[in-house]
Image (cartoon, coloured by chain):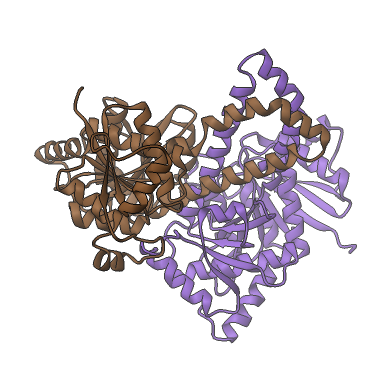
Chain colours: A brown, B purple
Amino acid sequence: MNRIRTIALDAMSGDHGAEVVISAAVHTLRQRQDLHLILVGDEAELTEGLRRQGRDADGASLSIQHASQVVTMDDKVAHALRNKRDSSMRVAINLVKEGRADAAVSAGNTGALMATARYVLKTLPGIDRPAICTALPSIEGHSHVLDLGGNVDCAPEHLFQFAVMGSVLSSAVDGIERPRVGLLNIGQEEIKGNERVKEAGRLLAESSLNYIGFVEGNDIYIGGADVVVCDGFVGNVMLKTTEGVAKMIGHYMREEFTRNPLTRLAGLVAMPVLNAFRKKIDPRRYNGASLLGLRGIVIKSHGGADNLAFANAIKIAALEVDNAVPQRIHSRLESMLAQGAPD
Amino acid sequence: MNRIRTIALDAMSGDHGAEVVISAAVHTLRQRQDLHLILVGDEAELTEGLRRQGRDADGASLSIQHASQVVTMDDKVAHALRNKRDSSMRVAINLVKEGRADAAVSAGNTGALMATARYVLKTLPGIDRPAICTALPSIEGHSHVLDLGGNVDCAPEHLFQFAVMGSVLSSAVDGIERPRVGLLNIGQEEIKGNERVKEAGRLLAESSLNYIGFVEGNDIYIGGADVVVCDGFVGNVMLKTTEGVAKMIGHYMREEFTRNPLTRLAGLVAMPVLNAFRKKIDPRRYNGASLLGLRGIVIKSHGGADNLAFANAIKIAALEVDNAVPQRIHSRLESMLAQGAPD
C-alpha cells in the first residue's frame, strides 16, 4: 500500500496541551512513512514546539493547520458548538469533513468532541447516535466495548446499532470473520434483567450477527466475547471502576513493597517482572476510543494521555482508515436492512 | 454485653454445601463465646458433619434445626417460594421472623433469598424494596455500596431510600456520625447524566443526610464516600467488573512470575510481600452482603464462599445484631418522615 493516510491531530485540547501531541506525532513519524499528520492549533505555538523537537512542518509528512481557539475541559457542549467554531477540535473534524484528512484524533472534552463530530460529520444512515468504543484487555486477548459514555439512556434499537458497529469494528481491525457479540447484563436469571437489555437481546438473536447472549461484568476481562454492548451509563461506570480497581491494587502493592528494607529488596528483585506485568496491562497501550457511527473517523484520546498513549490513538486512527471502518459499518447496515433486520 | 446473639445459618445452599458452613461455625465459635449458632438443614447430614469435626450440637452455642429441602442455585424464585417451604433457607429466615434467631446467613441463590426474606420478614415502613449492600475496600478504607443487584430499575425514591439505609449501616457498623453519601453517576457534566440519578440527587440534597454529590466508578476504590448509591443493574456490573479486573491482573502477574526460572526465583523472593498484598484485598475478608430494608437481619454470603469467607459473613451478621441495624433504619426513616423529607 503506497497510499498516504492523512490524520488531523487536535493539538491543543488535552490536559497537557500541544507538547504531548507534537511529541506523539514526531515519535509516530519516526516509525511510519505512510502517514501525513496535520497538527491543528495555534500556528506559532506549534511551529515553536516542533522546532524544540528539531522538526519542522515539511508539508509532506507533517503540516500545521492554524486554529485560533481551544475547547477547554470545562466548556459546555452548547458553548463549544456555538462560540468556538475555530477551535482546534472543530477545525480538525472539518478537515475530515472536507476530505483533507482521513481521520481526526482529539484528547479534548468528550461531550464537546462527540457533539462537534456529530454536528459536522453527521451519523451514518440507520444510526441514531454515535457510540464510544474502546478495546479493553482480557485474559483471552481483548474485546471492544461500547457505549462508554456517549449515550446515557439507550433504547433497545440503539443497543442493537451499537452491536452492529462493534461487530464491524472487530471484523475490520482484528480480522475476525464473525465476532462474538455479547450483551452486558446481570446474570442472575431469577432477578429480572433490565427490560431494554432483554428486548435488545431479542433483536440481536434474530439478526445475522454472531450474538452469543448475555455476558456479565467479569466476562469483559476474562474473555469470551469480541464485542460487549451496553448503554453509556453502565459502560462509563464499568470503565471508571476498572481504573479505580487498578489504582487501588497498585496502591496496596506499592505499600507492601515499601513496608521495610526487606520488602524493598524483594521489590527490587521482582522489579523487572513487575514492570513486564505492568506493561502488559498498561492502559496507554489501549488509549484511543472510536466514535463509531459517524460519516468519518474520529478517535478520542484520554485527556491525560502522554505521548506514548497519544501515539497509540494515532495508530488506531490509521488502522481504521486502512480498514475503511465507517464505509464497512454503512454497508453492513444496508445489507442488514435489506434482510429486514430491525433498523 | 452478656447477651448471646443467635444466628441461623442456612447450612445447605452454598456451592460447597454443609461442610463449609459447619467449618465456619466451628471456627467462629472457637473465637467467640457470645454467639449461639443454629445450623439449618438436613439433621442427619449436619450431625454427621459436626461429628467429623469433633463437635456436637450442645444446644447452648450450637444447635441444629432440621429442614428437609434445599433451594438450588437454578431454582426459580417462584418455585422456591411456592414449593420449598421447608428449605434450609426459608427455615433459617423463619427463625428470625419467630424471634428465635437475631439474624440469618445464607450462601444461597440471591434471587430466592431476596424474595423469601422479603416475603417472610416484610420490608420496613417507608421502604419499598430491600437492597443488597456490601463493603468494598478502597485506598482510604472501605465504602458501603448499594444496590448490588436486588433492584434493576430504580426510581429516584428508591435510590433515596438506599441512601438512608446505607447511611444508617455505615453509622451503625463503622461508628461514623455523618457518613458521606455519594450517588454513582458518570462525571462528564456535558453529557447529560441519567435523569433518575439527577432527580435522586435533588432529593438527597434536600435531605438531612450528609450528601456529597455525584461520585464516579473510580471513586469507589479510591475513596471519598462512606456510602455509594446506585441501582442494582449498575451496582452488579460494577461488582462483577471488579472481580474480572482482579482476575485478569492476577492472571497476568502469575504469567510473568512463571515465565522462566529467573522470574520464578523473583516470585519466590517476592512471595511474602505478594501474599501480604493479596491478603489485604482478599475478597473473602469482605464476604457478606446485607439485605437492607427488611424487618430483620439477613446476610447473603457469596455462593462459592469457603469457611473463612462464610465466617466473615457470620461476623457481619453479629455486628448488625449488636448495632440493631433494622431498628436504626426504621427510626431514621421515621424521623426523616417527621421532618417532611421525601418518602
Q: Position of residue A125 (x, y in %)?
A: 14, 48
Q: Is A257 drawn above or below residue A272 in the view shown?
A: below
Q: Position of residue B18 (x, y in %)?
A: 70, 36
Q: Is B342 drawn above or below residue A336 in the view shown?
A: below
Q: Nearer the viewer, residue B175 or A243?
A: A243
Q: Residue lying furthest left in this view?
A: A338
Residue B266 relative to residue A44: left or right: right
At 71% from the left and 57% from the top, the residue drawn is: B103
Q: Position of residue B253 (x, y in %)?
A: 61, 28
When asked about the image quadrant of residue B295, the answer is bottom right
Q: Residue lying furthest bottom in this view?
A: B339
Asked whether the viewer can see residue A210, the reply is: no
Q: Position of residue A227 (x, y in %)?
A: 35, 36
When asked about the image quadrant of residue B307, the answer is top right
Q: Across the whole image, how many numbered discs are drawn on residues?
A: 0
Asked whether the viewer can see residue B188, the reply is: yes
Q: Nearer the viewer, residue B250 or A317?
A: A317
When asked about the image quadrant of residue A28, the answer is top left
At 14% from the left and 36% from the top, the residue drawn is: A331
Q: Nearer the viewer, residue A264 or B88?
A: A264
Q: Residue lying furthest top in this view?
A: B261
Q: Nearer the viewer, residue A313 or B315?
A: A313
Quadrant location of the N terminus of chain B in the rendered image: bottom right
Q: Is A49 drawn above or below residue A36 in the view shown?
A: below
Residue B150 relative to residue A79: left or right: right
